[in-house]
Amino acid sequence: MKTRLVIIILFFAFSVPTFAAHPGGTVYADVNGLVCAFCAHALEKVFGREEAVESIDVNLDKKVVTIHFQQGQKLDDATITKLITDSGYAVRGLRHGD
Amino acid sequence: MRFLFVTLLGIGLILPSLVQARPVSYPGGWTFITMNDGTLNSAYVHYSPTAKISVGYTFEYWRDRELYLNAARVTHLVKRWNKPDSQANLYFKTGFGVAYSDAGELDGETSAAGFAGLAADWEDRRYFISYENRYTEAGGIADFFQQSARVGWAPYEGDFDDLHTWLMLQVKHSPESEGNFTLTPLVRFFKGVHLLEVGMSNRGEVLLNYIFRY
């Protein structure tokens, strides 16, 4: 019983902050042309104007842009694709996270 | 020499380059660029209403020609190739304005002026190649063609927020000038929205370029 309780406490201790960090969910965009960090700051600027977006992460190794949303807010796939295209890149595909 | 000139020009017209690190930005983006080397001091501000075009103002001082140029400039992204591990771009640039000369008999002369050229580049995370050319016409004051090419290598692959470093070699060709080839090894650094290039040519002239994007 004690062990179960410790496991449950540990589960919540580690999982709650994870959910709280990006309560609105996440979309992963696989992007072509993502090779230059200086140029890729366009993505930060373009997505930064969107109220629904909490933050983005750019991974140059995996060529993935991770978009975190504000709680209760989202952008549809067409809008995400357009914003990435406007930033100068091509979208290979979108994957929806939490 | 003529064969080399024609070859370089031909390569420039069909191959992908970029000295100015993306002369077109994202919609609503502003960019400030200053470029300085043995022949030229320039300042250039541009705004991109779309991801395909930028409009701006450029001031140039061509030291060897004692020529000042103030011009409105438009750059058009003709084509971009976004591949999984690389990107290539082809740009057309043009500008119109006023030139002023300080040189000898032309001292005090002003004239309408314009320029046009192509720029192309290809890069992945380790290698970079670029080419650009430009023909400048300033009435009775000056008319000249210039082209340059670069190759670059990144000694490491930095993450998005890291300081990035590139080692580059630039060849500039000015057919009308004496000793018309200039070779400049340089280092390009960038972090965030700041890009700095520092180098020294085979003539001992310093190259110092800076770009800020906001």
Image: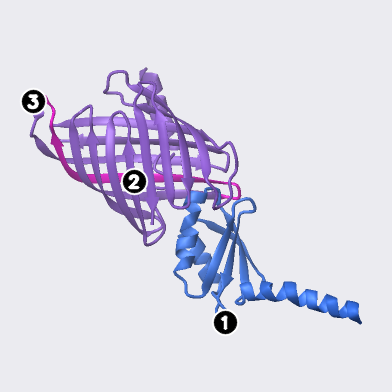
Chain colours: A blue, B purple
Residue furthest front as drawn: A2
Seen in the image, is A84 located left or right of residue B32? right
Q: Which residue is mark 2?
A: B33
Which chain contains the residue that carries disc 1? A
Q: Is residue B52 above or below residue B9?
A: below
| Subunit that carries the residue with mark 2 | B
Instruction: Point out residue B16 in the picture as x, y percentages from the top left corner.
Output: 46, 39
| Viewer can see residue A84 | yes
Residue B15 at least partly seen: no
User: For the residues carrying marks 3 and 2, which lies nearer the camera in this image?
Assistant: 2
The answer for how far apart the CA atoms under marks 3 and 2 are is 32 Å
Q: Residue furthest right?
A: A1
Distance (Cα) linking label 1 and label 2: 40 Å
Q: Is residue B119 above or below residue A62?
A: above
Q: Which residue is mark 3?
A: B105
Viewer-nearest of discs 1 and 3: 1
The three-letter amino acid code for the residue at tag 1 is Gly
| Mark 1 and mark 3 on one chain | no
State the residue position of label 1.
Answer: A72
If the image is split into quadrants, where does the N terminus of chain B sit? top left
Q: What is the secondary structure assignment of the residue under circle 2?
A: strand
**Element marked by disc 3:** helix
**Do labels 1 and 3 touch, CB within 8 Å?**
no
- Mark 3 on the same chain as mark 2: yes
Q: Position of residue B208 (x, y in %)?
A: 36, 36
- Which residue is at a point 49% across and 61% down the rendered structure image? A44
At 38% from the left and 31% from the top, the residue drawn is B148
Residue B188's label in the rendered image is none
| Identity, as a three-letter code, of the amino acid under mark 3 | Glu
Residues shaded magenta: B83-105
